[in-house]
Amino acid sequence: MARQDPVTIVGPPLDAWLTAAMLARFAPLAGAPLQVLETTPIAGDNEQVILRPEMVRTHVSIGLNPARLVARPVQAWTGPQGQSLPFKGFGQPLKGVSFVSIWLRAREELGEQRPLASFSAADDTRAFAIEAGRYAQALKAIATEVGVTRCEQASGLIVHSDSDVAAANSASLIGAAAISLKPSMTMRLHALHQTVLALIECWPWRDSDRDLAAREYNRRVTAMRSSMSDMQSILWNDERPHERSSNLRHRIAVWQKVGRIAPMDDDPFQPQEWMAAFLHAGSVPSGAGRLAKSLTHAEISAHTQACALKEVANV
């Protein structure tokens, strides 16, 4: 049997070994060997990375449980200006009314002073902060156990994650190579995880599928790039309102009108992250939704207090 061309992952060690471990576990490689070309040395432990809840599930699937490493649980990630962006939702709905609408009525009519962030949902969402060097070494160990090797020259199908190195025209771009990112390790790792998942889901099963798979992958990455660019413009506060994308202007308009986050295809962020980003930027909804008017003041007061005390799991 002829030896198949390899799949080479090119990029910084953390990016490359995470990609290799995910491709080895989930991609239909049909026996093609996987190899990693590291573009930098493995980082030291002076920098931490955040493993989001959806990333924790992926890591457990590839054989790396963050809870068993020297990692600390976290409830949010931090934006460039100290913004706290939570992984958990805010409160719980009541009688079909979103908690944001309940909170807005409590502010308007009952003098509620507590910020929305103080009403985090009572659920088992898990995220972890881990030292970057320790994390990269653990990923490398997982990948090499399943046959991934290290190489000095890229060949075969190339998957590129390094934004600082020019990629070959034939390379599949992932992470920071596919999505322009500001200097944020949390955003970079999130973009990497999301684009690798998309690459796996769009992996061509036959040679005749390659063009179709590439178009679908590019469509999904373009949607992710749009959302990540919008989130960055809010967090870094570096765009004037008239320069914002149409999607972001629509999201802000819906948020300010009814206190909800308009859904977008392949959005890599959860609604509560957008809510927190908008609130940190000074954007507050104009009022509670119409359905919220059906609740009595007693119901609103009791429910907000229960959510503040984390006594409400699911309503």
Image: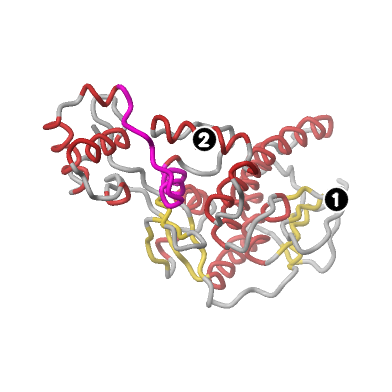
Along the viewing direction, whichever of 108 and 301 lies nearer the viewer: 108
The structure residue drawn at horizontal position 36% and vertical position 47%, both measured from the top left corner, is 88
**In this picture, which residue range is highlighted in magenta?**
272-290
Question: In the displayed structure, does residue 239 sit left or right of residue 173?
Answer: left
Secondary structure state at the residue bearing disc 2: helix
Q: Residue at x 27, y 45 (%)?
A: 122
Q: Is residue 270 left or right of residue 114?
A: right
Give the camera-side residue of 74 and 34. Answer: 74
Q: CA distance from mark 2 to mark 1?
A: 50 Å
Residue 196 percent coordinates (x, y): 65, 47
Mark 1 neighbour density, 10 Å: few (under 14) some (14–19) many (20 or more): few
The label on residue 311 is none
Quickly name the residue at label 1: 3
Which one is nearer the viewer's eye here, 73 or 68?
Answer: 73
Query: Which quadrant, please, contains the N terminus?
Result: top right
Q: Residue at x 24, y 41 (%)?
A: 107
- Residue at the disc numbered 2: 251
Check if residue 285 falls in the magenta segment. yes
Q: Where is residue 164 drawn, in percent x and y?
A: 76, 64
Please name the amino acid that badge 2 sits on. Answer: Arg
Q: Is 123 part of what is drawn in magenta? A: no
The answer to which image quadrant residue 217 occupies is top right
As helix, strand or loop, the secondary structure at mark 1 comes to loop
Mark 1 is on which residue type?
Arg
Percent position of residue 78, x then y:
46, 60
User: Quick one: quadrant of the C terminus?
Assistant: top left
Crowd band around label 2 with a 10 angstrom C-alpha radius: few (<14), some (14–19), many (20+): many
